[in-house]
Image (tube, grey):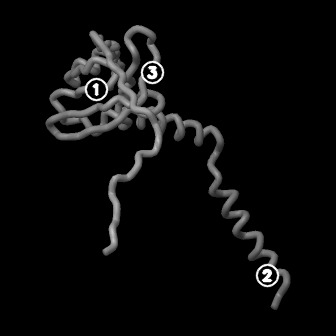
């Protein structure tokens, strides 16, 4: 085995690898082009907030009837609009807020931000009944004859 030829072989991949590294300026151009062309491909994100406090609302049920699809807002109050692309209306529902619905055009005009109004339920009278805690004696008895 010739030692000189092994060294040349060991160095060759490094020379090839160095020749494949692009100029840093070319990389910036490629990255910028990729970034700007990728923007339209991303789906719009719907953000749901409280109309009064402007705080995000997590756990909002978001659904459409046609096509039938449902999702829940994440901890940031967001949900992707991608699944609702063919929907004629998108509905928003949460136990503490009044339900609302919007067309995709209305969503776009609102910059994909939905404001929910808090709903309040008034009760006339509340009755709380409690039974004492304790063991009840069993009335079932066994008899042997």
* Image coords of residue 142 (percent x, y): 34, 65
Name the front one of labels 1 and 3.
1
| Residue reaching furthest to the front | 145
State the image quarter where residue 28 is shown. top right
Q: Nearer the viewer, residue 96 or 67?
A: 96
Name the front one of labels 2 and 1.
1
* Image coords of residue 80 (percent x, y): 35, 34
Tag 1, which secondary structure?
strand
Q: Which residue is mark 1?
A: 93
Task: Give me the residue at 73% from left, 64% from top.
Answer: 14
Tag 3, which secondary structure?
loop
- What whole-number distance in Å separates the C-alpha atoms at marks 2 and 3? 67 Å
Task: Give me the residue at 19% from left, 36% from top.
Answer: 86
Is residue 27 shown left or right of residue 65? right
Image quarter (top left, top right, bottom left or bottom right) of the C terminus = bottom left
Image quarter (top left, top right, bottom left or bottom right) of the N terminus = bottom right
Q: Nearer the viewer, residue 48 or 5?
A: 48
Q: Are marks 1 and 3 in contact (CB under 8 Å)?
A: no
* Image coords of residue 51 (percent x, y): 37, 11
Q: Which residue is mark 3?
A: 56
Earlier along the polypeptide chain: callout 1 or callout 3? Answer: 3
State the image quarter where residue 69 is shown. top left
Q: Which residue is mark 2?
A: 5
| Residue reaching furthest to the right | 3
Name the front one of labels 2 and 3.
3
């Amino acid at each position: 085995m010739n030692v000189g030829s092994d060294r040349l072989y060991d160095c060759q991949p490094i020379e090839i690898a160095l020749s494949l590294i692009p100029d840093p300026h070319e990389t910036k151009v490629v990255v910028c082009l990729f970034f700007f062309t990728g923007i339209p491909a991303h789906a719009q994100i719907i953000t749901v907030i409280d109309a009064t406090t402007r705080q995000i609302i997590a756990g909002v049920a978001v659904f459409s009837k046609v096509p039938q699809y449902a999702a829940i807002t994440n901890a940031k109050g967001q949900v992707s609009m991608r699944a609702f692309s063919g929907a004629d209306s998108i509905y928003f529902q949460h136990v503490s807020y009044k339900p609302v619905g919007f067309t995709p055009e209305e969503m776009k005009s609102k910059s994909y931000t939905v404001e929910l109004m808090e709903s309040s339920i008034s009760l006339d009278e509340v009755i709380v009944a409690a039974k004492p805690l304790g063991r009840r004696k069993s009335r079932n008895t066994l008899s042997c004859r």
